[in-house]
Image (spheres, helix red, strand yellow):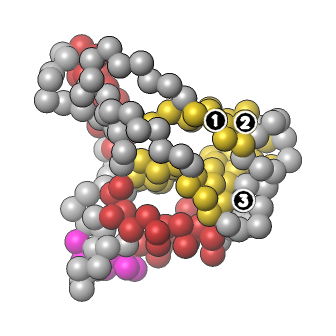
């Protein structure tokens, strides 16, 4: 069994910003700062996934081998920095053979076309379903192209981030 992953963010500095935000939270302990964060562990051999999401703006789910999207149970935990000393707990799911794990930010809810309609996570899920069976890098390229075409002449005031990982038996 093996796994491969790809990621895309509409903000070129998002990974740097995340590292800086976590560093500020840990070193400066500013009471008004917080960060949404998802940690996911995937064991390719068994498909066991353990995940923990701080905050409610990151969705975690999968496209199974038949091309069906299912979002994992929300963790219902505060953003990092909002609750000092909070003990974060993980949840578990199983990623089937030939399935795709997806993590996406709420930034897709803020990507709007010229008519003001949101691209949304539901449309990302539709793109995932439409591209099921492709390599994750091609799936990601299709989603990015679809979003770019949708947002053309619209607004993208917030970054949207998506991470895809495939499990091959």
Residue 156 in the figure: left or right of residue 102 = left
Q: Nearer the viewer, mark 1 or mark 2?
A: 1
The answer to whether the residue labelled 1 contacts the one labelled 2, judged by CB atoms less than 8 Å apart, is: yes
Do labels 3 and 1 touch, CB within 8 Å? no
Image: magenta residue range: 149-155
Q: Please name the residue that numbered disc 2 is placed on.
A: 48
In this view, the residue in front, 90 or 39, is: 90
User: 10 Å neighbourhood of mark 2: few (<14), some, or many (≥20)?
Assistant: some
Which x, y percent locates residue 105? Answer: 40, 52
Q: Earlier in the sequence, mark 2 or mark 3?
A: 2
Query: Could one spot residue 38 in this view of the protein?
Result: no
Please tell me which residue is depicted at 30% across the width and 68% down the height of the picture: 111
- Gap between marks 3 and 1, in whole Å? 16 Å
Q: Is residue 168 above or below residue 80?
A: below
As drawn, 121 above or below 11: below
Kindly identify which residue carries mark 1.
92
Q: Position of residue 39 (x, y in %)?
A: 51, 33
- Is 153 covered by the magenta stretch? yes
Residue under the point 72% across and 43% down = 94
Q: CA distance from mark 1 to mark 2?
A: 7 Å
Residue 165 appears in view: yes
Q: Which disc number belongs to residue 64?
A: 3
């Amino acid at each position: 069994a093996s796994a491969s992953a790809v990621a895309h963010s509409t903000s070129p500095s998002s990974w740097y910003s995340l590292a800086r935000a976590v560093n500020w939270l840990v070193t400066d302990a500013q009471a008004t700062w917080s960060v949404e964060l998802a940690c996911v562990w995937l064991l390719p051999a068994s498909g066991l996934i353990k995940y923990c999401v701080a905050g409610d703006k990151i969705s975690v789910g999968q496209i199974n081998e038949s091309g069906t999207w299912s979002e994992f149970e929300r963790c219902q935990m505060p953003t990092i920095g909002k609750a000092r000393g909070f003990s974060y707990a993980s949840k578990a799911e199983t990623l089937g053979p030939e399935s795709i794990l997806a993590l996406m930010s709420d930034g897709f809810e803020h990507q709007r076309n010229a008519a003001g309609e949101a691209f949304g996570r539901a449309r990302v899920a539709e793109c995932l379903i439409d591209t099921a069976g492709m390599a994750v890098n091609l799936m990601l390229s299709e989603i990015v192209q679809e979003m770019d075409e949708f947002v053309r002449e619209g607004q993208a005031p917030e970054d949207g981030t998506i991470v895809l990982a495939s499990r091959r038996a």
